[in-house]
Image (cartoon, rainbow, N blue to C red):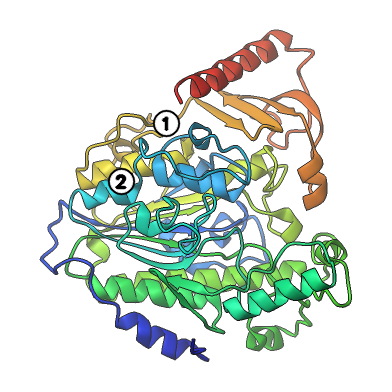
Amino acid sequence: MKLYKNHLSIFIICLCISSCTKPRSVPESTPNILLIVSDDHGSADMSCLGRLEDVQTPNLDALAKSGIRFTEAHASSPICSPSRMAIMTGVHNQRFGTYWYGGKGIHDQQYPTIAELLKKKEYATGYIGKVHYGSGEYDADPENRNFPLNHGFDYFFGHTSARKHYLRHSDAEEEAFTSLKEKLNRKGQTLRKQSFWRNKNKVDTLSFSTQMIGNEAKAFIENHQDTPFFLQVSFNAVHNFTHQLPETYLKERGLQGYHDWDPKTEEYYDWYQKGRFPNNPEGREQYLGQLYYLDQEIGKLMQSLEELGLRKNTLVIYIADNGGSTPIYANNTPLRGSKYVLYEGGVKVPMIFSFPGKIKSEQVMSNWVSAMDILPSICSFTGVEKPQVLDGLDLYPLVTGVDLNIGHDTLFFDTEHERAIKTADWKWHEAISNKSAIYEMVELELGAKLRNLKNDPGEKEDLSEEESEKAAALKAALENWQDRIKGEN
């Protein structure tokens, strides 16, 4: 297949995408939905928070100012594939039997997706960017429900893996790299250089993925400006490997960069460790570079909505899939922990709701909310009947000012090697194994701990002995939830 050498050619192709439904006037009762999901975005890494001097996110700041920024938003999991399942279905990922990497994904059709629900109201549906619930390759199994075209989406442009090389996208390159690794008997993960999917076909390109995803998203919006649409845009930014930045950006910032893994000269894990905290002297600058491009593309999407006259009838939701990854220099200050673990830094995420005219601007809310709340909230905004089984809450009354008391009073987490429960000011957290934490270079204390998050947001003080009855009660409540989830599925 032909390699497209520049962003312009990709954008021209995107503009040629045909509409998935017949164009018609869009009434206010069927608003457009734009769901933007980022990857591993640190909860402190937005300049509007005023916590960090090195962060500049003017477009995310503007989006937050135009609506509601939640300070207590939670992912369902500290890693991407389970948490994205919860976003898409509004239920705990454990209902699918998925606790960590390697699950079957959203295989159970009793839990419909956002796209499947909106199709009932004749929405055009598009998915652009990263898809990662489980194995989802169309060529391996054309009926695989994890592939976007098999769970409600009319159009798909993206990839179906945990990570993606930011700059190189060619199956031939990926196959050559894999063959070299096997020939040299090097053990280690792939760099994911494979092609992008465009529906059921593969596309080879040398473009920068963040910009390419943004261009595809703008093209979809332009092609569906006369029909209600649901568009999910899932950037792989700011996921590892953040050193894969455009050469022009590195030169402008005076950065030396970091090289991709070369199986001919080094072991994978040696290379992996050198690129992560605290070993990469440019690690923070590389992370901020990926955040810069993410913010730029979000700004361009908002500008496109404005120019097409769609902004006033579009609900925009922004969320990160899990907590910031501190090994790649994300910052979760003042929280303890990182992606991969169930400290607050692993599960608290940035989340924004914006809808001019429907949601009052310049609001900051501290209600406990969850990624699982996105699906039921979208149902209320669009008038679509909610599924019978939901673990998320409908935030429509909250964000429209009807009921400001809505929020979760208890949150549950289970990765099988960690589990936790939060209620009121208290959190009971048990770490059974730290094998993954050691590999990913994040800190995790083994054992069961009870902490008062109001007095100890950094999760340093264990009160399990002083408050033994509280610890026992929370443990029992968590185990009851675990038994209930397993019993219902």
Give the residue drawn at x 37%, y 40%: 109
Q: Amino acid at mark 1?
A: Asp
Q: Secondary structure at mark 1?
A: loop
In this figure, which residue is indicated by the disc labeled 2? 378
Disc on the earlier residue, 1 or 2: 2
Drawn side of residue 285 relative to residue 26, left or right: right
For residue 391, which numbered disc appears in the image? 1
Under mark 2, the amino acid is Ile
Q: Closest to the observer: 467 or 150?
A: 150
| C-alpha span from label 1 to label 2 | 14 Å
Give the percent coordinates (x, y) of residue 11.
40, 84
Pointer 2 local density, CA inside 10 Å: few below 14, some 14–19, many at least 20: many
Quick one: 378 or 98, which is closer to the camera?
A: 98
How many numbered markers are drawn?
Answer: 2
On the question of residue 360 being in view, the answer is no
How many residues crowd mark 1 within 10 Å: few (<14), some (14–19), many (20+)?
A: some
389, 460: nearer the viewer: 389
Can you tell which quarter of the image residue 128 is in? bottom left
Instruction: Kindly tell me whether residue 187 is visible in this rendering.
Output: yes
